[in-house]
Amino acid sequence: MKTYAESVCRDTASVPHAEKASAPSKTESVRFRSLGDELVGKLFRPAAGTPAPTLIVCHGAGEFKENYFEMCEVLAGRGVASLALDMHGHGESGGERYFLKIKDWVADIRAAIGFLSTHPGVDPNKIAAFGLSSGGTAILEAGVLEPRLKALIALDATVRNSLPAATAIPLKIFLGLGKLKLAITKKTLRFPLAKMPGGPKMASDPEINAKLMANPRALEAFMAYPLPGAEDAFFVDTITRVPQIGAPTLVIWGEDDELDPPETGLRLYAALKCKKRLDIVAGNGHVGHLDRNRAKVFALTGDWLLENLTGV
């Protein structure tokens, strides 16, 4: 297989349906602790019983592990196990609802590595991490600190303050008001992010985006967004630290991402000093794991893992 140490690729092919796993996976619900709270995840393992290379899957702000089950099934069919995890404050895991502290999510990733390293179905020397948006922030920050991560995949990762001024300014105003409310009342301001003008456009495909925004679990998160408490989803400087990452890193970006433009992906790619690859996927928005060309995201992820964890 070709090594993509310094390649930049733009994919223009349309992949309407995600590829299916070639064999059924073994799944198990798992629980372990991070920062005193219980984290909940689902482990997908290949049908073969031998210890497998394994991917830790980190969702974005307001998301949950179930959004990644299709990808995990596909990867299991290619011989790669996946741990789809509810991060701190999200899904079934403990922590304050929808709070998002990148340092806490990094701790979650390190706790997941510790858990997986003792699992009989996991090869402890072949653990990688995948993250979308704020999950991408967390896996990159973990990659700076954690030598046990042998490969990284960042999907539309938040690495800088890239929001347009029309969005960033109101958020900073409400963040200031939230800090004032917290100081006076000891209560957190819950901001209805979904009601901002235009609403967040997550997927490029209109039907997929409508379904995402109608999902009651997503609405609950985006109608009760904690400020302060989740500002790390927008205001970070991770790009200043990514040159310290040593693990091979794949950057995937949606060409139609309106929340964080492909320019951010180009900047992230340029800042990385490790073995790296950038793929900009046409027809995808901010949530490439759910969008019209999600099969391309799955394929790129699987190829990168096999190349860098197994040498295939």
Image (spheres, rainbow, N blue to C red):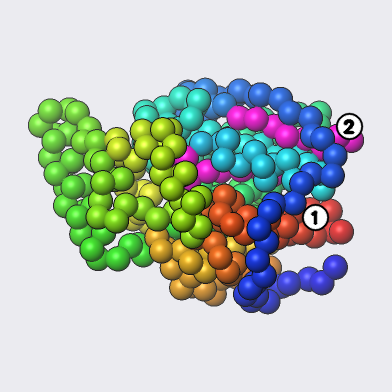
Write down the residue under mark 2. Answer: 49
At x 19%, y 28%, the residue is: 187
Quarter of the figure that contains the N terminus:
bottom right
Q: Nearer the viewer, residue 19 or 54?
A: 19
Is there any visible trace of residue 277 in the rendered image? Answer: no
Q: Which residues are magenta?
A: 41-63
Count up the numbered dots. 2
Contact? badges 2 and 1 (CB < 8 Å)? no
Write down the residue under mark 1. Answer: 306
Q: CA distance from mark 2 to mark 1?
A: 18 Å
**Amino acid type assigned to the residue bearing label 2 in the image:** Gly
Residue 289 is left or right of residue 78, and the answer is left
Numbered circle sitting on residue 289? none
Estimate how packed mark 2 is, as few (under 14), some (14 to 19) or many (20 or more) residues with alpha carbons within 10 Å.
few
Residue 284 is left or right of residue 308, and the answer is left
Q: Is residue 40 above or below residue 160?
A: above
At x 37%, y 37%, the residue is: 219
**In which quadrant of the rendered view does residue 31 lie?**
top right
Estimate how packed mark 1 is, as few (under 14), some (14 to 19) or many (20 or more) residues with alpha carbons within 10 Å.
some
Q: Is 278 in the magenta?
A: no
Q: Is residue 199 above or below residue 54?
A: below
**Amino acid type assigned to the residue bearing label 1 in the image:** Leu
- What percent of the width, then of the height, locates residue 179? 18, 41
**In which quadrant of the rendered view does residue 248 lie?**
bottom right
At x 21%, y 47%, the residue is: 175
- What percent of the width, then of the height, locates residue 62? 42, 40
Is there any visible trace of residue 43 in the rendered image? Answer: yes
- What percent of the width, then of the height, locates residue 46? 82, 37
For marks 2 and 1 on the same chain, the one whose residue lies earlier in the sequence: 2
Q: Nearer the viewer, residue 190 or 19?
A: 19
Q: Is 52 in the magenta?
A: yes
